[in-house]
Amino acid sequence: MMGERIDGKNIALAIKEDIKKFIEARKSQNLQIPKVASILVGNDGGSIFYLNNQEKVAISLGLNFEKIHLNVEVEEKELISKIIELNNDDTVSGIILQLPLPKHIDEKKVIANISPLKDIDCLTFVNQGKLYMGEETFLPCTPNSVLTILKSLNIELEGKEVVVIGRSNIVGKPVSALMLKENCTVTTCHSKTRNLKEVCSRADILIVAIGKAKFIDSSYVKDGAIVIDVGTNSVDGKITGDVNFDSVIDVASLVTPVPGGVGALTTTLLMKNACKAVEEYEN
C-alpha cells in the first residue's frame, strides 16, 4: 500500500483566501488594516530568507508590512527601545522577532519586552503560559501548522496515540501541548529516549522535529500511520526533512513532504494571527 503525500500548499491557499476576504471586508468598512513589524538583527541567511518571505506573503494578502533590519552590533537596550516603540504604535498589530539573536543580546530579556497583545509568534512567557494552560492565545506558527494540517484532513484526533520526536521550545514542547489539548495521548521523545523505534512504531501520528536529515525511515513507522515532518535541513543546497520520505511513504497512510508540507503554512498562519490581533485590539 502506497501512502499519500499531504499538500501543505493547497491547505495554505484556502487560508490565504480567507485572509484576503477579511482584509477586503475591513477596507470596505474603513477599518484598520493589520500591520506586521518584523525585526531582524544581523545577516543570518536563513533569517533573511524568512523575513523576505514574510514580506512577500503579507503584501500578497493585503497586509501592511514593516521590515526592521538592525546591525549585528546593535546594543540590547537599542533593540528593546525599538520593540517598546512598536508596542506603542497603534498602527502595528503584530511584532515578529527573528531568532536566534547575536550572542551579546539576552534573548529572554528582549522577548519579555514584546507586548503579549502583539506577540503573534507566541514567544512571550505570558502567551506560552496560556498555551500550556490550554487558554486562548496566539498559537506559534510551526506547531499550529501541524495541527492545521491534521484538522484539514478531517482526522479524528481524540484518543489517538501521538509521538513527538523533539522537545525544543519552538516546536516539540508546544506541539505536544496542542495535541494534548485535542485529547490525544502524547509521548515526547528526545536524544535520551530509549528504544526510540519501539516507541515510534506505536504512534498513530508521528511528528518529527529533530533536525537530522532523513533520520526517520519506514522501520520507525506503524502501518497506516500519519507522519508529519517538521524538519528543515540544508543538504547539498537543498532543503530536506527529518523523514526519509521515499522509505516512509510505503508504510504510512499520509506523509508531509519537505518542502511543501508544514513549512508551506507557517508564514500564512503568522499573518492569520496578525488579523486576529487587529480584531482583538478593537475589542
Image: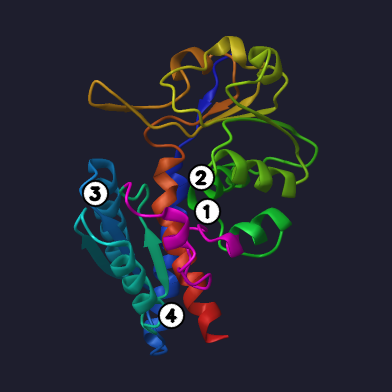
Q: Which residue is mark 2?
A: 170
Asked if the residue under mark 3 is in contact with the one under mark 1, i.e. CB atoms within 8 Å, the reply is no
Q: Tell me which segment is drawn in magenta.
A: 103-127
Label placed on residue 48: 3
Q: Amino acid at mark 2?
A: Ile
Q: Quick one: label 2 or label 1, which is nearer the N terminus?
A: 1
Name the magenta segment's main secondary structure: loop
Mark 1 → mark 3, Cα distance in angstroms: 20 Å
Q: Which residue is mark 4?
A: 25
249 in the magenta segment: no
Mark 1 → mark 4, Cα distance in angstroms: 26 Å
Q: Secondary structure at mark 2?
A: loop
Q: Amino acid at mark 3?
A: Ile
Measuring 42% from the left and 27% from the top, which residue is drawn there? 241
Label placed on residue 162: none
Q: Which residue is mark 1?
A: 140
Mark 4 → mark 3, Cα distance in angstroms: 32 Å
Measuring 42% from the left and 75% from the top, which residue is drawn there? 93
Task: State the residue lying farthest toward the top.
Answer: 219
Quarter of the view holding residue 214: top left
| Residue 181, image x, y percentages | 73, 50
Q: Amino acid at mark 1?
A: Pro
